[in-house]
Image (spheres, grey):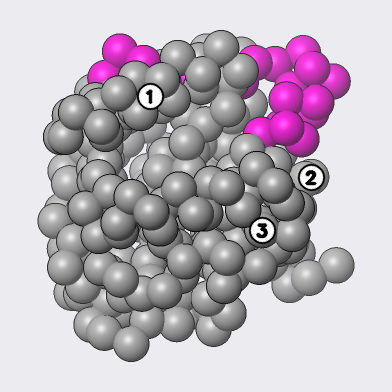
Amino acid sequence: MGAHHRVLQEEPRLKISIVVPAFNEERLLAATLDGVKAAARIFDDSGGWELIVCDNNSTDRTAEIARAAGAQVVFEPHNQISRARNRGAAAAAGEWLIFVDADSVPSAALFRDLQEAIDSGECVAGGSTIVPEGSLQFRLAIRAWNALSRATRWAAGSFIFCERSAFAELRGFSDELYASEELELFGRLKTLARRRGKEILILHRHPLRTSERKLLLYRRGELLGFLARFLLHPRRTLRNPAACKPWYDGRR
């Protein structure tokens, strides 16, 4: 059993641990962390919270910016978002883990809805819908995703919450996948939730704000090329970082 799984099974000391995986995120990280900290104040009176940034082998000022914001910084040398999230979780002390992407900003209202979901005792994990704003193409894609997410109880990777014990039992995100690792995790979480008699919850009253930068940084042909490779060879594509360029080629 890996070291991060041993850490996850220790007795939690806080209620909430917020984990932000970050690879070369110096442009957006400061604003994201400011937003996360402002929203997280609602947890001050309900067991406390901590903020952890996993520097995923960045070559810019990501770690420096995270430390300046008061976050605990951990390092994952292998450039892979699932490993970065798992490394952040390994350092966490909370009963609940919240994963927020470095280009996404949750509101206090979203965190309040999350607190209510946790306090209900009925859910084991979940996510959030996303604000449909930006270009028309992005808005249409997000509306379609939101409907699919609520129907299937799949969470977008930009905002995931999970009970620590469930995350530990499932051994976290798969380290074989370089994309869609959140969907694979939620497939296992849904099985665990049924076994425990709990729910997977997609929060929707106060959607998450996230960036449309992939649509702005990558040509349509590049994105369609990834989609075509995925549809033809899904397992091979998701296990090959070179095939998942929008996440790993460093374009920011």
Q: Secondary structure at mark 3?
A: helix
Quarter of the C terminus within the rendering: bottom left
Residue 78 seen in the figure: yes
Q: Cβ–Cβ below 8 Å for labels 1 and 2?
A: no
Question: Label 1 belongs to which residue?
Answer: 129
Disc number for residue 56? none
Residue 30 in the image: x percent, y percent?
A: 16, 63
Q: Nearer the viewer, residue 155 or 140?
A: 140
Q: Given this view, does label 3 or label 2 mark the residue nearer the observer?
A: 3
Image spot of residue 234 (x, y percent): 70, 49
Q: CA distance from mark 1 to mark 2?
A: 26 Å
Magenta segment: 186-206
Q: Which mark is residue 169?
A: 2
Judging depth in this view, the residue of 166 and 31 nearest the camera is 31
Q: Tag 2, which secondary structure?
A: helix
In front of the other: 13 or 71 = 71
Q: Nearer the viewer, mark 1 or mark 2?
A: 1
The reply to whether the magenta stretch includes residue 198 is yes
Give the amino acid at mark 2.
Glu
Give the image location of residue 171, x and y in percent. 76, 53
Q: Which residue is mark 3?
A: 237
State how far apart marks 3 and 2 are (Cα): 27 Å
Q: Residues within 10 Å of mark 1 (few under 14, many from 20)?
A: many
Residue 33 visible in the current orientation: no
